[in-house]
Amino acid sequence: MEKPRISVIGMGFVGLVTATCLANKGYKVIATTLESELVEKVNKGIAPFYEKDLDELLKSVVSEGNLEASLDNKHAVLNSEISLVSVGTPMLEDRSIDLSYINICSLEIGEGLKEKQEYHLIVDRSTIIPGTTRNMIGKNIEKVSGKKMGKDFGLCMQPEFLREGSAIFDTLHPNRIVIGELDKKSGDVLENLWKEFYSGEDIPLLRMNIESAEMVKYANNCFLATKVGFAMDIARICELMPDMDVKDVMRGVGLDDRISPKFLNAGAGFGGSCFPKDVNAIINFARTRNFKPKILTSVLDVNDFQAKHMVDIAEELAGKLEGRRVTLLGLSFKPNTDDMREAPSIRIVSELLSRGIFDIIGYDPKAKETAKKVFRKRIKYAKSIEEALKDSECVILITEWDEFKTLTPGDFKKHMKIPNVVDGRRIYDYEKFHKEINFRSIGRI
Ligand code: UGA
């Protein structure tokens, strides 16, 4: 059977990684974006952001002619049988979801379908509040194309579960596929695509209606964020008495296979383009229907408060930090990415500045350039760990990059003016560090 041609609308993490992985398995893919710079880069085989292994894979699929980047959604639709929609759905000022890219691209998909005779399947991969696939994407396409969903074109919602930093691995080895379908034919076409793509692999595949699939994504991210929030709450309790250690507590708890050890690391807080945005969006969705989700609201409170708590710990350890140099190790929202969206470092810098602490120097192995766009001249940027530690009176470790894990108490003593270290990710051996330098960590006093 001939492989269907695919268009991928949106070239962020999800879109570009999906497009590249499909092209690498021999599918003809057209990926689109609104940004001409991005099109130019991708057509030269250059990854526009840092993601493990993406550069290499992209170079090869572009040179083989399997992936074309374009600005033109109509062209993409007319030259494919299936369109995967993965445009951004960022957070608005009021913390609700911004659906404007979904709105625009579905109108453009409609323009393409207007000129097309054959059946076409549209699959939403973006995280969108329940009801949006049917009521915005489906209806916009009907309005512009004059065609009927379920008859002339198919409609599905397939939530995406990939993580930044391991996006290619996650795309090639998903732990499940969830298909929300308008009707059986739409679901069958999508199931066939993935069965062929993952042939030989045993991946659980669930089929359900569109709205439930939209909610699977929110419930999934909300649960993971809740696990992390829960761990931070338990960490605070562990800090109320000497010798209780959240790391050991969560190791014990995680061995219960009803709970699992994953996402139980209490740290400087969760960030990224998904957890804060999605928890906020679904709270907002519920509120507009007169329900206030209490657990999720508390999860956000715990996360927001963690930045203040980190700076409290730093000042308990080092004394008032106003007028003294503070070093931030790690600025990205997690290791192996240069993404700064909703990173805990942003909240920590705001807290430091609000306390009059202006001599801040940050070091991050990959996120220096993105951090400069966020903080501008409000902090200084070091080129190395040594430079970041020089003259410093307090280190706050925010992101657990591998290169920080090998630092010893001696390194901090050697380079810092006074070795005060706050381990916000529990990467250091508590007993060892506590004996040799002024040391505090999340979840243990
Ligand atoms: C998350 C989900 O894990 C993916 O399944 C989902 O597809 C994605 O959102 C999305 O909706 O697109 P991601 O944002 O890449 O992926 O990052 P995670 O690895 O989940 O980490 C999120 C945040 O939680 C990070 O700031 C991380 O430091 C924090 N975290 C995670 C903890 O503080 N403790 C933990 O134990 C785990």
Image: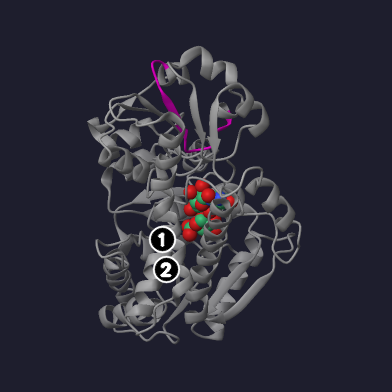
Counting from the top left corner in percent of width and height, residue 39 is at 33, 45
Q: What residue type is disc 2 on?
A: Thr
For residue 115, above or below residue 64:
below
To which residue does mark 1 refer?
A: 301
Residue 394 image offset from top left, x and y in percent:
43, 27
Q: Quadrant of residue 329?
A: top left
For image coordinates 32% across by 82% down, the residue present is 142
> Residue 196 vs residue 226: left or right?
right
- Characterize the local packing of mark 1: few (<14), some (14-19) or many (20 or more) Cα atoms within 10 angstroms: few
Q: Secondary structure at mark 1?
A: helix
- Front residue of this view, candidates 20 and 238: 238
Residue 158: in sight, yes or no? no
Residue 102 horizontal side relative to residue 227, left or right = left
Q: In what quadrant of the picture does the C terminus appear?
A: top right
Q: Which residues are magenta?
A: 390-402
Circles 1 and 2 in contact, beta carbons < 8 Å: yes
* Residue 284 at least partly seen: yes
Label drawn at residue 69: none
On screen, residue 396 above or below 237? above
Indicate yes or no whether the magenta region holds residue 396. yes
Q: Name the main secondary structure of what is drawn in magenta.
A: loop
Residue that protrudes farthest toward the front in the picture: 241
User: Residue at left 49%, top 80%?
Assistant: 210
Q: CA distance from mark 1 to mark 2?
A: 6 Å
* x and y percentages locating residue 152 in the rendered image: 41, 83
Write down the residue under mark 2. 297
Q: Is residue 244 magenta?
A: no
For the residue marked with disc 1, what is the amino acid?
Asp
Relative placement, left or right, of 43 versus 227 is: left
Task: Give the image location of residue 145, x and y in percent.
Answer: 29, 79
Sort mark 2 into few (<14), some (14-19) or many (20+) by Cα contacts within 10 Å: some
